[in-house]
Amino acid sequence: MVSALPPAVTPGNPGGVRGWVGHIVRTASSILEGLAVTLSWAFRRPYTIQYPDKVEVPVPETLPEAYRGILEVDLRLCTGCLQCEKTCPIQCISISIEKGEDAVRRLTRFDIDISRCMYCGLCSESCAFDALAHSNQFEAARQDISELTLHFVREPVPVARHKAGEAPPRRPRGEILREVLPGLGPVMSPPARDRRAGQGDPSSGEGKP
Amino acid sequence: MTGTVPTLAFWGLALLTIAGAAGVALSGHMVRSAFSLFAALFGMAGIYALLQADLMAVVQLLVYVGGISVLVLFAVMLTSGIGRVGTDNPSHRPIGGLLVLLAVLIPALGLAFRMPLGIESPADPTVAPIGDALLGRFVLPFEVVSVLLLAALVGAVNLARGWRRDPEERPSEEGR
Amino acid sequence: MSVGLPHLMFLSAVLLALGLYTMVTRRNAVAILMGVELVLNAGLLNLVAFSRFGRGIDGQVFGVFGVVLAAAEAVVALAIVLQVFRAMRSVDASRADRMKE
Amino acid sequence: MLRLIAQRLQSWLNLPGETGAVLPALAVMLGAALLAFVFIAFFAGPVTWWERRVAGRVMSRIGPNRVGPQGVLQWLADGLKSFLKEDIVPAAADRPLFLFAPYLFFGGYMATFVVLPFGAHLVATDLSVGLLYLIAISGLVVVGILMAGWGSNNKWALFGGIRSAAQLVSYEIPSAFSLLAVVLATGTLSMQGIVRAQGGWPWEWLLFRNPLLFGMFFVSFAASLAENNRTPFDLPEGESELVAGYHVEYSGMRFLWFMFAEWGNLWVIASLATVGFLGGWQIPGVRPEVIDQSTGWAFAGWQALSFLVFAGKASMLVLFAIQIRWTLPRLRVDQMMIVCWKYLVPLALLGSAGVLVLVALVPEGSPVDWFLRAVSLGLGLWLIIAYVRKARAAYLADREPYRRLEGKDPWYPPYRLP
């Protein structure tokens, strides 16, 4: 019941009628002060940027190498060891390998359900051949959840059998993903990369509230 | 009151008022009773408006509907927990009540139906004459009522803050 | 048929009867107060009706007084009810019969 | 079919008039109600968008700008979303009360439109007790809030309802007393009468009639903000303490009714202040008699023009109310009561008594009257100049740091859209 009432007499404000008038004057002037501040914001540039239309550099380009985006697998490097499938704590990777009549093992299925993936990175850690890795992409919102199951194998591919040091270089991050996840947007144009490289000023991206 | 729309409106409002009053009298749920009272008082305000008593209608809205029914709701909600929705409103001696009801209703209705239809006075605005009357012929009652209101207000405030004066007398439940 | 005095008297009579019924049968003090309000309204309706179908505006002036008095009555009554509730943890009118705690 | 029902109704109730006379009368009533409803919908909807854009600017962000050009159709999208949502009724709720409360709330709000004058002759009815009616009917909304709060069977909802009732009953007093000053100055309770007692030019407005009325305007505006649960007085729904207050449990269309009335109420606040203090629909330089005597297209034109004047003034006040909402923090419950009983009520009482004295002593048109008008006009001008200067100072104070940090100028006036 008893509420903590503000003291009637504050330092700088005498009590009584003079204090009462003082309170009113102070309230009115501080409201005016506050309204003036909010009015001044009507003439200031908003801090927020319209994402993604008016971003100068696409966000994936600004992400560090270790960023764990959506998984992608380079089938030219995959040996079909199934380590990733076994490591995955939520079983969102499913791989099938069939041995054909010519005794060559072929990958017939390499699916990753990225709607279930929790981006823990255990699979890419366990991949000894750097076939399975995180891309720098993260925008994969779709109308139907089934579209989020990525099918990396279009037609059966033989598993990789490269000698050490002879393996082809991995394709650039995000490129494979763009083939299996339609609508991910165009590949970054070189000028954009240049612009990003030129933005070496460390104060530019920081200091924002 | 003649004309289609006023007649229709009268019956609608009368229905609302009677339904509200019946809700007050018969509902076993305290809160619903209170809301029914609101409906009945609101219907009365509408009927005053139909009777060209503008000021009366607005005063009814302002004081009864906006003030008293809200106070009653407040009281109901303060004096019963929200634990049970509605909270009981037990009625006792329903037969005695019914007897009282009939004993009043039958003679009153008999009187009502023997009334002449009556002639309406012209529909002049009544606010200004009432204002003149209040500050002219009825100035003494007006002042007495203001004194009474002041006394009631002071009394109510005094009553409502009764326990605050000596905290030792407060019941133990309130000391939590 | 147009609406005249009998209709208003009928409405007033029903309100009066229902208000009395509420006052007689209810145990809850707030409910009894509601009954009183209904009875008061029945009376006020009569005043306004006779003022409309009779002469002059005295009925309405009296009606305004009535509403104001009803407000004062309600405020005091509810303050008492709240006090009773604080003292006895109940608003049962039939149990509030002790003069002193 | 309808005709048959109407005839039955007529014979039952023994209604006068020719058969079927009920039908056109009902049609007119329904039509008027529909008109008011459409107005509310087309006011309340865009205002939600506008408020969010203003809020965006104040908070240095952009606000909704996706649906339609600059997001103007955002309210349609929101409405459609609410419309398609499931209407959930809590199992332990008091069902009839819970279901009925939004309609009571909305109906109480719509009833205020009966006396609001939109233009010279654009008013549903000009009641002789219009102002008193407006004060009374806007007090009804609280019953809807209490009903919602109780019916939800939820502690937060009940807190919201009770708070709202306490707040409304308290703030009705300063609101009524400050409007009493208007009544004393104009000598009438009718809304049109109040407007006609003023003039088109600012020095003919009640706001600038004398310094006391100038002060009463702010008391009245603050009190009506509180009566309609706008920030800084939105304790009944304070989302940081009561989740959402009395409408926690509502969803779908029923929730939408609450929102409708809440934003539509802005119009009522604004037009009450416009009628009472800002000269209503009066067109500067045009006597109302000219409008009364015009006919045909000229009459329609005057109506439209007077509506535009009224809407312009009311929109400015709506903008002001929105800016206040995004400037001031919510009061605490005890502060809310202190503001009412210790400050607004005495101010309103003193102010209306002072206005009474001034009206009795200073005849209109006398030198003292002109002096008082000049003083209050000067007061208003000084307030506006101080406001703009303070805003400029606040902008300039942050300009250099922004430049140093971002490498560009912060100048971004409101007409420059993102």
Image (spheres, rainbow, N blue to C red):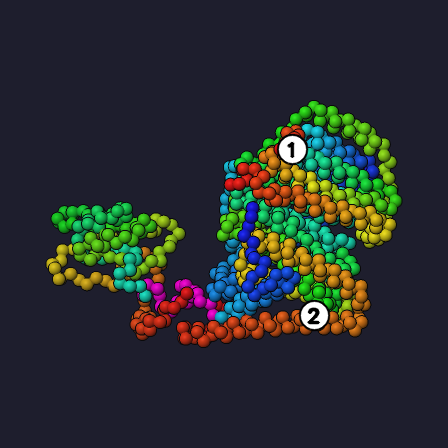
Which residue: 26% across, 57% down?
A134
What's the amino acid at mark 2? Ser
The label shown at residue D407 is none
Residue D265 appears in the picture as rendered: no
Judging from the image, what secondary structure is the residue with disc 2 in?
A: helix
Query: Relative to C96, is A116 on the left or the right?
Result: left
Judging from the image, what secondary structure is the residue with disc 1 in?
A: loop
What residue does disc 1 label?
Answer: C100
Mark 1: give few (<14), some (14-19) or many (20+) Cα within 10 Å.
Answer: few
Which residue: 53% across, 74% down?
D393
Q: Can you say whether D395 is above or below A66 in the image?
A: below
Residue D61 appears in the picture as rendered: yes
Give coordinates of residue B116: x percent, y percent. Answer: 87, 36
What residue does disc 2 label?
Answer: D376
Residue A59 sits inside the magenta stretch: yes
Residue sticking out furthest to the left: A163
Q: Can you say whether D307 is above or below B7 in the image?
A: below
Give coordinates of residue D354: x percent, y percent. Answer: 74, 62
Q: Can you say whether D290 is above or below D40 in the image?
A: below
Residue range in magenta is: A45-61
Mark 2 and mark 1: span between their CA atoms?
60 Å
Magenta part, dominant SS: loop
